[in-house]
Amino acid sequence: MAGILDVPKPRINCSMLSQHINRAVCFVGRVEKVYPTGKTFSVSDGEGNNATVELNEPLEEELSGIVEVIGMVSNKGAIMATTYDVLREDKGTPFDLELYNEAVKLIHDFPQHYPFEVAASG
């Protein structure tokens, strides 16, 4: 069976979490708060809505800025992260989270042009 990193994942925002329960997703957002245990943090999307990200192991580094999280959406609507990457905002060009959010909505509005799922084989 293919791992979560090997399968296509839709890019989503907070408003789409409930439609992707028990499915692999890709979420990009700004880190808003890291909880004291280091195993949970909250991120905001381009509309200012918040999602919770849960990790299997506590963070080993300070986390801030824009992150891309790949994981499964739990029944409670949290993202159970398999992996995350901090998107560097160096060279003076900040990541435009609002524009990214508009692109995510566009992808979902026209799935015939932006397919993210592959047909299951035999």
Image: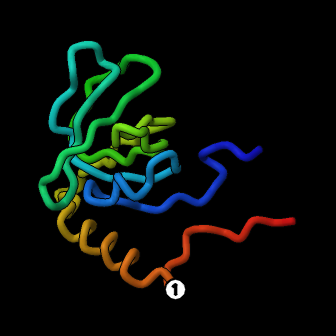
* The one of 86 and 51 positioned closer to us in this rendering: 51
Q: Residue furthest left?
A: 48
Q: Residue furthest top?
A: 37
Q: Where is residue 79 in the image (x, y as percent from the top left)?
A: 39, 40
Q: Which residue is drawn at 23% across and 56% down?
A: 91
Chosen colour scheme = rainbow
Q: Residue furthest front?
A: 75
Q: Where is residue 30 in the image (x, y as percent from the top left)?
A: 21, 46
Q: Which residue is drawn at 77% across and 44% down?
A: 1
Quadrant of residue 63 within the rendered picture = top left
The number of discs equals 1
Q: Residue at x 34, y 53 (%)?
A: 17
Judge whether 116 appears above or below 71 on screen.
below
Quick check: 96 left or right of 112?
left
* The one of 19 and 118 positioned closer to us in this rendering: 19
Q: Where is residue 24 in the image (x, y as percent from the top left)?
A: 52, 49
Judge whether 7 appears above or below 37 on screen.
below
Q: Which residue lies furthest to the right in this view?
A: 122
Quick check: 101 left or right of 11?
left
Judge whether 85 appears above or below 16 on screen.
above
Q: In which quarter of the image is the C terminus?
A: bottom right
Quadrant of residue 107 within the rendered picture = bottom left
Classify mark 1: helix, strand or loop.
Answer: loop
Judging by the rendered image, the residue that carries numbered circle 1 is 112
Q: Where is residue 78 in the image (x, y as percent from the top left)?
A: 34, 38
Q: Which amino acid does label 1 sit on?
A: Gln
Q: Residues within 10 Å of mark 1 (few under 14, many from 20)?
A: few
Quick check: 86 left or right of 65?
right
Q: Residue at x 46, y 22 (%)?
A: 56
